[in-house]
Image (cartoon, rainbow, N blue to C red):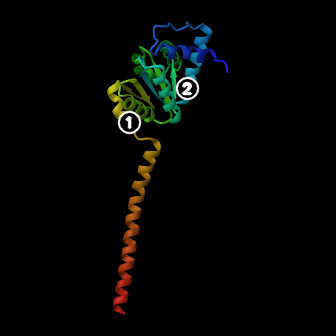
C-alpha cells in the first residue's frame, strides 16, 4: 500500500531521528502541511491526554520497538514537526495548551492515549529495557493539567485511571455494607447460640 503524504513525511522524520540523522528531511509542500495539521487536530480532539517526548538519538530499531509497545497498549505515537503541532493546537484557541508550546523544540514524538498514565508506563518500561534515558518526556497534558519536564514521569505513572478510581469508590462503599452485614450475622449467630443454651 503506498504512503499518504503525511505517512511519507513521517517516514523521513523517523529516518532522520535514527543513527543516519545526517540525511535531510524532504521539505513538505503547503498541501502536505495542511494535511498533517488536520490529522493532528483530529488526534487532539479525539484524546484528552497526550505526551510530548524527545526521541532524538534513538535508532530505527528502537523507534520501531517503541511503536510496537505503544500499539500493544492502545497508545498512538506520531512524529511531527513542532511548527505543525503548534499550529494544530493554536487552531483550538484554548488556553489549556498555552503551557505546552515551550516544550515544542527538538525532535518531537506525540503519544496519544485514553489512559492518563499508560504512555508514562511505556516510557518507563522502554528505558529499563534499553538501559537509557530516552525518550525524554518534555511535557504531558492530562485533561486540563500540564506536566512539564522529564522529572514528572514518575508522578505520571502514579496517576489513577478512571477504572481504578471507580474501583476504589466501590470498595469504600462496600466496606460499610460488609461491616453491617457482618454485624448482623454475628448478632444472629449470638441469638441462636443463646436460644440453644436456654433450651
Q: Position of residue 17 (x, y in %)?
A: 46, 15
Give the residue number, with chain letter if any, for mark 2: 43
Mark sitting earlier along the chain (1/2): 2
The secondary structure type at the circle numbered 1 is helix
| Residue lying at 38% horizontally and 61% vertically, measured from the top left | 176
Badge 2, how many Cα within 10 Å: few under 14, some, many 20+?
some
| Residue lying at 36% horizontally and 38% vertically, measured from the top left | 158
Which of the two residues, 88 or 66, is positioned nearer the viewer here?
A: 66
Label drawn at residue 13: none
| Residue lying at 38% horizontally and 69% vertically, measured from the top left | 182
Give the residue number, with chain letter if any, for mark 1: 157
Q: Position of residue 99 (x, y in %)?
A: 40, 21
Q: Left or right of 31: which side holds 47?
A: left
Report which quarter residue 198 is drawn in. bottom left
Q: CA distance from mark 1 to mark 2?
A: 22 Å
Report which quarter residue 107 is drawn in. top left
Q: Position of residue 179 (x, y in %)?
A: 37, 65
The secondary structure type at the circle numbered 2 is helix
166 vs 174: above or below:
above
Q: Residue furthest left?
A: 151
Residue depth check, mark 1 versus mark 2: number of the one nearer the observer: 1
Q: Left or right of 47: which side holds 137?
A: left
128 vs 41: above or below:
below
Q: Residue furthest bottom?
A: 199
Q: Left or right of 1: which side holds 99?
A: left
Amino acid at each position: 500500500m503506498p504512503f499518504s503524504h503525511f505517512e511519507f513525511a513521517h517516514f523521513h522524520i523517523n529516518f532522520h531521528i535514527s543513527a543516519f540523522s545526517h540525511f535531510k528531511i524532504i521539505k513538505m509542500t503547503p498541501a502536505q502541511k495542511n494535511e498533517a495539521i488536520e490529522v493532528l487536530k483530529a488526534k487532539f480532539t479525539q484524546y484528552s491526554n497526550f505526551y510530548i517526548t524527545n526521541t532524538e538519538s534513538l535508532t530505527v530499531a528502537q523507534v520501531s520497538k517503541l511503536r510496537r509497545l505503544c500499539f500493544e497498549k492502545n497508545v498512538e505515537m506520531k512524529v511531527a514537526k513542532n511548527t505543525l503541532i503548534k499550529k494544530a493546537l493554536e487552531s483550538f484557541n484554548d488556553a489549556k495548551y498555552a503551557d505546552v508550546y515551550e516544550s515544542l523544540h527538538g525532535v518531537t514524538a506525540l503519544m496519544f492515549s485514553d489512559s492518563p498514565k499508560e504512555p508514562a508506563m511505556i516510557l518507563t518500561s522502554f528505558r529499563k529495557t534499553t538501559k537509557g534515558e530516552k525518550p525524554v518526556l518534555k511535557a504531558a497534558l492530562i485533561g486540563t493539567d500540564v506536566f512539564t519536564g522529564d522529572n514528572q514521569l514518575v508522578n505520571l505513572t502514579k496517576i489513577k485511571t478512571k477504572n481504578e478510581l471507580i474501583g476504589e469508590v466501590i470498595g469504600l462503599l462496600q466496606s460499610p455494607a460488609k461491616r453491617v452485614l457482618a454485624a448482623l450475622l454475628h448478632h444472629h449467630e449470638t441469638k441462636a447460640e443463646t436460644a440453644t443454651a436456654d433450651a
